[in-house]
Amino acid sequence: MLRIILDYYRDPIVNMAVDEAIHRYRTMVDFDTLRIYMWRPSGVSIGRSQDIHDTLYLECIWRYGYLPVVRPTGGGALLHMEDGEVTYSVVLGSGHPIFDLDVQTSSMEIVKGVYNALSILGVEADISGEFRSRGEPLCYFRRGSSDILIKGMKISGSAQMRDGNALLQHGTLLTKFIPEIWSCVIKDVDVNSIRDRVVSLSDLGIKTSVKEIYNALVEGFLEVFGGDFFYGSLLPEEVEIVDELIKKKYLPWLERVKGQ
C-alpha cells in the first residue's frame, strides 16, 4: 500500500524534518509513502557529511533571504528555488522488494518515477546508470546512477539513506534554472560549467503548470510501485516527530550557523 502526500510550499527546515519523520515512523505503519513538495522560502541544502562553511556562501544566502538546511541524506549541495523545483521523497519499508536491492540499483528503480513523469510531459530523457562521483560540492556536478539526463545534462538528482527498517530517497526535478544564483550561493561552482551541465524544464521550452507536474509524478511513480494507494497526510504521531526534530535538531543547527 502506498500513501501519497501532495504537499505544496513548506519551509526548508520543515521539509527535511517531514521526510526524516516519515522514515523514522515507517515501522509503525503498514504503508509506504510518496511525498511531492516545494520550497518557500527557497532553501540551500547540503548533504549530511558536508561542512556548511566549506560548501556555501552564507552571505549570499542571507542576502537572497534563503534558508540553509542539512539533509538527512548524503550527496552534494543544492539550491531549491521556490519557483524552480518540484521535489519528491519516497519512504519504503524493509518488506518492499526495492529495499532488497543495493543503494545504486534501488535508487535507479525509484527514480524511474521521475523518468516516467518526464515522458508523460513529452520530455525524452535517460537514466544515467553510472556512478562516478568525484566529491564535488554541488550535487548536480556529481554523477550518480539515478541521475536523469537530457542530452547529457542533468535535470534530476537524488540521494538515499537507509537503516535496517526503511529507506528514504528524495530528489529533484528542475523546472527553472538560474546558474548565476547557484554560483552565488554554492562554492566552487563556475557559471559556465554549470550552464553546460544542468538543464530545467523551462530551458527545454516545456510550459506546464505545477499541477500538471504533480499529476505526472504521481502517475510516473505509480507505474513503478503499482498496487493499491491512497491520498493522505501526516499522522499525528509523525507530526510530533517533525516538531521534535525541528526543536532539537534543525533549529539549533540553524541558530548555530547564524551565530557564527
Image (cartoon, helix red, strand yellow):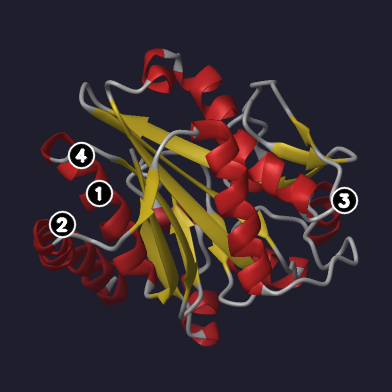
Q: Earlier in the sequence, mark 2 or mark 4?
A: 4
Residue 143 % position (x, y):
67, 32
Q: Which residue is mark 4?
A: 26
- Give the CA separation, mark 2 to mark 3: 41 Å
Characterize the local packing of mark 3: few (<14), some (14-19) or many (20 or more) Cα atoms within 10 angstroms: few
Q: Which mark is residue 196?
A: 3
Q: Quadrant of residue 31?
A: top left
Q: Do tag 1 and tag 4 residues touch (Cβ < 8 Å)?
A: yes
* N-terminal-most mark, 1 or 3: 1
Mark 1 Cα-neighbour bin, 10 Å: few <14, some 14–19, many ≥20 = many
Amino acid type at circle 3 is Asp
Mark 2 residue crowding within 10 angstroms, few (<14) / some (14–19) / many (20+): many
Q: Earlier in the sequence, mark 3 or mark 4?
A: 4
User: In this rendering, would 236 be left or right of 251?
Assistant: left
User: Label 2 near label 1: C-beta < 8 Å?
Assistant: yes
Query: From where the camera sits, is residue 184 visible?
Result: no
- Identify residue for label 2: 238
Indicate whether 108 appears above or below 87. above
- Name the residue at 35% across, 63% down: 15
Measure the C-alpha gap from mark 1 to mark 4.
Answer: 6 Å
Say few, some or many: other residues with alpha carbon within 10 Å of mark 4 (under 14 / 14 to 19 / 20 or more).
Answer: many
What separation in Å lies between label 1 and label 2 (alpha carbons)? 6 Å
Image spot of residue 228 (x, y percent): 40, 39
Q: Secondary structure at mark 2?
A: helix
Q: Residue type at mark 4?
A: Arg
| Residue matched to label 1 | 22
Q: Is residue 64 visible?
A: yes
Kind of residue at disc 1: Ile
Q: Position of residue 189 (x, y in %)?
A: 69, 55
Residue drawn at the location 86% of the way across and 37% of the way down: 152
